[in-house]
Amino acid sequence: MSRLWLAVASAAVFLLAWTQSYALEPRRESGIFQIDPPTPYIHYLPSSTPRGRVLVVHGLDVSKEIMQSTSAALADGGFEVYNIDLPGHGNSPVGFQALLAEQAIQNVLAQIGEDSIVLGHSLGGGLLLDLSATRHFSTMVLLAPAPTFVPKIHADRALIVTGTFDIPKIRTSVPFLADVGAPNVEWWCLPWGGHGTPILSPVHIRHVVEWVGGDGQNVRSSARLIWISVMFIAGVALGATLMPGRELKTQPLQIPATLVRYAAACGVAILILKIVVPLAWLRLFTTDYLVSLLLTAGILLWVQERRSLQIDPIAILKAIGAAAFVIFVLGFGAGSQVLHMALSDGRWWRFPCIVVAGLPLLTFDEVMIRRIDAQWKRLAVAIITRAVLWAFIVTGVLLLNRADASLILIAHFIVLFWILLWFAAGIVYRHTQDPLATAIFAAIVQGWAFAAWFVTI
């Protein structure tokens, strides 16, 4: 009975947080600019007469959703805002090319007004910098801009925001940009800030709104962040309550030997990928290398294991239901306010392919690691194996497949995702006691996330 009440309470809190979160959103509408290339957007409207118009441009391997907090804050501050998807990102129907992305920005500005304020994060900031060498902007806000060296920044005023723990090349490029843009460039370095701090921290978002001339007192970023966090926590609690667990059936395992096998499989995989990237036909910008590595390493591990698995249809159905809960309740319900979760026409077909590619390695995880006899050992091995994957990804793209070197910019985020997925899969495993069903759950969640997030070409 207590579990039932906890589920009801969690669902009620989730719905309350969802309602409050959307009540705090400014008026907005979505659409597609019918230009070359077609460019999806979210249009935010202030509650009073606009103080100006702002074009918001996101970074690499994300989408307009990651910029929703910044865009909503600008609308709170009195601006009309257009938040766009670059080619290859989010709902864009065309593949990514840097020149095409710059063309999209220029054509959007031609639609909404050439005198619009422009704000870009990471790649978006770098693209705006590149354009500023040949065209004039009234006001530019560059949040952790990708390193871009231009002879002159043509802007009446420009703000560059970085963090003390930002990407080193970004930190070292800013003094150069401040010099070529002088005296119109102002630089803020955020203490303890990282690459995402300027677009995720409510305090710094409000400061940016005030710098461009908005009313910082009306910005509601903190309240939105609180309710999104409450929504996510309540969703996790609801999911855990709906899948009561049992004690794991553990088994002894030679941990050093398992780690050596893991490292050996990854090492052989990056050598194979030097010759051929088997899933290059997925046409994902650099990340087809990542998916190919998962597939190749997983197959190599299973060749060593040679173990058959029993198929439990009931357990698999439960795992599929759990994956649907994560995708639609946690993903669309809570996560869609910061991450792109929808699979557009150009992304649907990649989803089952990535699911199948991830299944061998995830199944090996559940068979070999999940049932280690001590919980702290299980967690330690799970983290170490993810670190091994990260190390071989970085090694592979820096030494053997340099064309995919930009993968290192998101590799640490992928590792964090894998760790969170490990904990979620643990709930499913304790409920089903089935390694194959648990691996299917993890593969579906990972496949959906990668198909929705990764840049297409």
Image: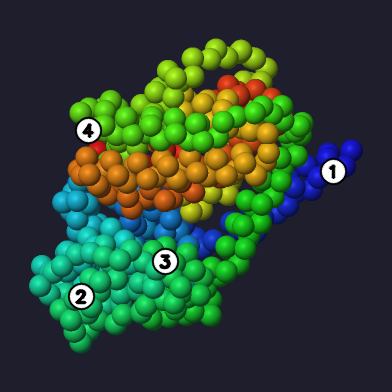
Q: Position of residue 412 (x, y in %)?
A: 42, 51
Between 373 and 239, which is closer to the camera in this rendering?
Answer: 373
Q: Tell us which disc is closer to us: 4 or 3.
A: 4
Q: Earlier in the sequence, mark 1 or mark 4?
A: 1
User: Of helix, strand and loop, which one carries label 1?
Assistant: helix
Residues marked 1 and 3 touching at CB (< 8 Å): no
Disc 2 to disc 3, how far (Cα)?
19 Å
Q: Nearer the viewer, mark 1 or mark 4?
A: 4
Cα distance in 3D space between marks 4 and 3: 32 Å
What element does badge 2 sit on?
A: helix
Name the residue rendered at 55%, 40% in the picture: 381
Q: Which mark is residue 274?
A: 4
Residue placed under numbered mark 3 in the picture? 194
Amino acid carrying mark 4 in the image: Lys
Q: Residues within 10 Å of mark 4 (few under 14, many from 20)?
A: some
Side (left or right) of 232 relative to 440: right
| Residue under the image location 89 percent in, 38 percent down | 1
Image: 136 above or below 248: below
Q: What residue is pinned by disc 2?
A: 177
Q: CA distance from mark 1 to mark 3?
A: 40 Å
Q: Position of residue 44 (x, y in %)?
A: 43, 61
